Image (cartoon, helix red, strand yellow):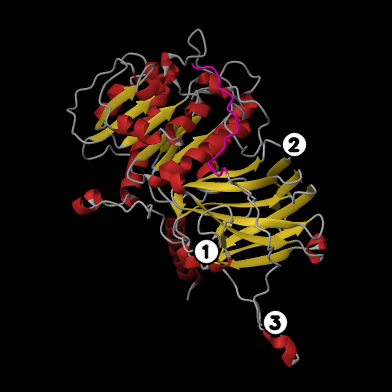
Amino acid sequence: MKTFELFAVLLVLSALFLSAAAPLPQNADPPSEVVKLIFIHHSTGENWLTDGYGDLGKTLGENNYFVSDTNYGWGPDSIGDRTDIPNWIEWFSSANTPIYMEALFNETEQHASYTRVLPDPGGENQIIMFKSCFPNSALEGNPNDPPGTYEELSVSGAKYVYNAILRYFGSRPDKLFVVITAPPLSDPAYAANARAFNNWLVNDWLRENNYPYSNVAVFDFYNVLTDPNAHHWVNQGQIEHITTARNTLYYPSGDDHPSEKGSRKATAEFVPMLNVFYHRWKAAAPSEPAPEAETAPQPESQPQALPAPAEGLVIDNFDSGTVPLSYGWEAYRDESTPSVMACRAAEGGRSGNALKIDFDIAAGSWGTCALMYETPQNWDAAGGISFYFRASSEGVFFDVDLYAGSSENRETYVYAVETSPESVNQWVEVSLRWEDFQRASWEENAGAAFHKANQITGLAFGMSAPPEESIAGSIQIDDLTLGYTEAEPPAAQPAAETEEAEKPMLPCASALLMPLFAAVALLRRPKRQPPIF
């Protein structure tokens, strides 16, 4: 082949390679049919929606969205009063969530002044937008703080909130949830924290949770308002998130409410982004249930569960600092005694972090570190669970607990493990079958084998102290996964040892199964209620 022919072939191949590697353009066209949308907001959102200010309501209507909204005083219990970041737990992750969502999905009123010419197409709101106001950019803590264990106005507390509410979003793939980040402040005191948190929402939140659906999206309203050259937009068919060195409000209006100019800039960038979010969601959204499926009664003893995952799925490796669709690990103790129980992800794991459980349990008392799910998990196909542990001392018993059934009638199943001499200096693997777990001694049908792997609502590690002495120390847990692995076939041994050697290589079980979590209802850490804006 001649040189120029070879060069031409290379050019063609290069073009084909670049074309294949280039990301597909995003569809920023308006929906082809009218889509019902509701926006949860306060004053900044009201300005953004209002004709002649931010023009968002009118612009959304021009893009085929039938817009409704909430404001102060709206809804059951006046839930519309409460839109700070910690309040999203009450909206999306509380006992009242079904009540609030029913009202939200069916709301059709306006609470701001914007033009709405589209007729109501009927049915429920399909898109739920929600936003906190600018005081929520005053997040305490440090920019790189990991998710915490309760809701508050801090970097870790805000991450906790968004991780917690994600489980509800995962239970409603038929709705599109759009997070609008809180606008920036003029005061730079917490600006670095706000920037870091909002970057986490845009770039890391869903990825860290291994979120499997397309029904959650984030628009960085904060970033758009920090600089004329800061953008979150669709540019030449691609989504771009462009930040600058500024972390404070560039568009004030006399106070920290964004100005008309800033609000209109946000409208111009957001609406095409919403179109992209909508088309992504519709492309992956589940089909509508059949009429008989909508009305068929569900047996109370069989709560709807997620599809059974493949064996080997990681429940938690403790490196991301969070667990999908769960409350996250929380410590509980017998508060009638001076017992101490703490658990957190910490360095020193097998290949990163591990769950570190520190305990000082008073005589006759208990403490536990629990992971609870609001949506029952279907782990039936896995056969069991496996994990590694390391202990500060030998001869300490700790329990592995499984919780199943409805929250009103929760059942506890227990397997007890004794820390061995080997576990003090090295990681020891524990592999448990579902049938290894037995109903807790303090519940009815004590000793019954576990048989509800398709209804798991939580799991825990904990310890009980005998009546005559206290226990103290620490245990690390790592690489908690679904699946049970039989022990490797033993090497040839004398006949007398064969029967014992063929048993699964499990740590010793305790004959003393004491109550660890008798009040297993989700005790929550006292909430710090921020002011309402």
- Residue density around tag 2, few if under 14, some if 14–19, many if 20 or more, within 10 Å: few
Q: Position of residue 450 (x, y in %)?
A: 51, 63
On the rendered structure, is 283 left or right of 224? left
Q: Amino acid at mark 2?
A: Pro
Disc sitting over residue 448 in the figure: 1
Which image quadrant is residue 145 in? Answer: top right
Asked whether the residues under the numbered discs 3 and 1 touch, taking CB atoms below 8 Å apart as contact, a structural biologist would say: no
Q: Relative to 448, is 78 above or below?
A: above
Q: Nearer the viewer, residue 371 or 314?
A: 371
Label 1, label 2: how many angstroms apart (C-alpha)?
33 Å
Residue 458 image label: none
Q: In whole angstroms, how far apart are the C-alphas of marks 3 and 2?
A: 42 Å
* Kind of residue sitting beneath label 1: Ala
Q: Is residue 39 above or below residue 513?
A: above
Q: Which residue is mark 2?
A: 338
Q: Which region is colored magenta?
A: 519-533
Q: Main secondary structure of the magenta part?
A: loop
Helix or strand or loop: what does disc 3 sit on? helix
**Residue reaching furthest to the bottom:** 495
Q: Earlier in the sequence, mark 3 or mark 2?
A: 2
The residue shown at (19%, 23%) is: 117
Q: Is residue 490 above or below residue 513?
A: below
Mark 3 or mark 1, earlier in chain = 1
